[in-house]
Amino acid sequence: MRRSASLAVAAALAAIVCVGSGATAAQSESKHFVLSHEAERFGYVSLVLESFEAAYDLFVTRSGFETFPVPVDVRIPSGFMDGMGAEYLDTDAEGNPIPVVEIASEASMSASADESVVGMTLEEAVRSTAAHEFFHVLQDYAALNGKGDIAEPAFIEPHATAIQELAAPEADDYLDAAVDLFFAPDAMPFFDRGYDAGVFWVFVLDRYGLDALSDVMAASAVEDGAAAVDRAFAARGMSALDLWAKFVAAWAADALPDRDARGRMLAAWRRMLGQPALWLPAPIATGAWDGTPLVLDRVTEETSANDVLGYSDSALGASLRVSSSYGIDIVSILPQSDATLEISVGASEAASFRIAISGRRGAVWDLLSVSGRTAIVSAPARYDEIRVWVTRGEVGSGHYTVTLSGSG
C-alpha cells in the first residue's frame, strides 16, 4: 500500500513541471529537485520526485540537516545501471560544487526490488534509494563545510544504508546489505565494513535517534573510526566499545529492530542453503555440557559463510580468536545435563573483551549475562542451546578460551 506524503511534500509535488521535446527526453521539477529522464512513465517520475521530496522533508525540514542552496540534479539513466542509485559532485560554470544523483529506471528498480531477500515493493525500493542517495548529498555538504568527512568510509555508506530505514521502514532492505556481517561477523574490522555495517547504525538510530548519527558525522571531521564514535557518545557516557557491546547483546537476545523481517530473511537463507537449523551468526565452535568439565579452544565448525560469501572467519582447528576489532565469535553449548553450568571466558586481562550469553528455547532467545567473563547458568537443560557471544575492541590479540565447569 502506497504511503501518503506529508503536507510539505504534497505542496512541493504540486509544483511538478514537465518540459522537453519528444518521447526520448524530458525534465520534471519539484521544489527541491530537477529530474532528467528518457521515456519513463509519468507515474514513476512522480514516485521518484515524491520520494526525494519526502527525504528532503525528513532530513532537512524536520531534522535540521543542511544542504546545498540549489535544486539537486536527479537523473534516471536509460537501461539497467549497476546498482539502484549513485551520487557525486559536479561543478557549475563558476566552479562551485553541485550535487548530482542517479536513480535506476523503473525496469531496473523493479528487478532489484524483486531480488530482495526480505521482499519489498517498487515504491519502497524507490523511497529507500532516494533517501540513501540524498543523504549522500547531505554528507557532501557537511564535509565541504567542515562538519563531516566524506573520506571516512566507516560512516559514508553505512550511515546512508541505515537512513533508508527511516524513510522506508517497511522495506527493511538494509538487511539485504548486511549479509556479510550476518554470515562472517569476524571477517574484517567493523570500521572497515561498508553497506553491511548499516544494520548496526539502524540499531543506533532505534536506541538514540537521528541526532546520534548527526553527532558522529560532526565528530568524523576531527576523528576517525572508533575515536569519532567515542567523541560523539562521550556526552552519553559511552565509548564505541560500550555501544558495540549493547548491539551484540541485543543481537544475542534477538532484540534488534525488525525482528519479523530478520525472520523472513533467515527463513529464505535456510531454504537456499538447505539448513533448517541455521541461526546467524553460525557458531565456529560447539561443545556439549554433560556435567563434565570441558575447555573449548579450537574452531570445530565449518560455517555456511564460504557457501554464501566465498570466504569464512576461521579455519578448522585454528585457535579461538576474535581476529578483527569489533568482530564477533559465537561458541555454542548444547546442554545434555541439568547440572548448574559455569561458563568462563579466558583471555588476557589487558584485552578489551565483551561477553554476552544467551539461551534458546525453540525460537525464543533469553539474554542470560552481559557482565564480566564468567556466568552461572542454573538448570541449563531448559535451553536447546546456549550461546557465548565474544567480541572485543581494538586492544589485545583476540585469543580466548571457553571453559565449562560445574558450580555449586
Image: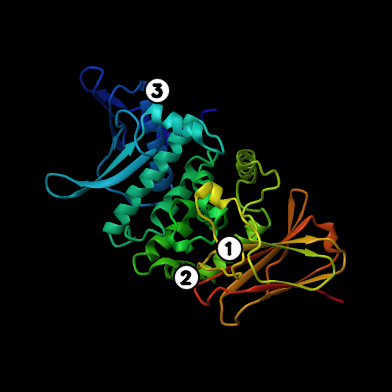
- Residue at the spot of label 2: 230
Q: Residues within 10 Å of mark 1 (few under 14, many from 20)?
A: many
Going by the numbered disc 1, the residue's amino acid type is Ile
**Does the rendering let one see residue 208?**
yes
Colour pattern: rainbow
Tell me which residue sits at (45%, 34%) in the image: 112
Q: Please provide percent x and percent y for residue 329.
A: 61, 63
Residue farthest to the top? 22
- Residue at the spot of label 1: 328
Task: For mark 1, give the secondary structure.
Answer: strand
Q: CA distance from mark 2 to mark 1?
A: 20 Å
- Residue at the spot of label 3: 43
Front tag of 2 and 1: 1
Image quadrant in which you'd find residue 287: bottom right
Going by the numbered disc 3, the residue's amino acid type is Gly
Image quadrant in which you'd find residue 207: bottom right
Tell me which residue sits at (74%, 48%) in the image: 363
Asked if the residues shown at circle 2 and circle 1 are in contact, with their CB atoms under 8 angstroms apart, the answer is no
Tell me which residue sits at (57%, 62%) in the image: 315
122 and 187: which is toward the camera: 187
Q: Please provide percent x and percent y for residue 176.
A: 52, 44
Going by the numbered disc 2, the residue's amino acid type is Asp
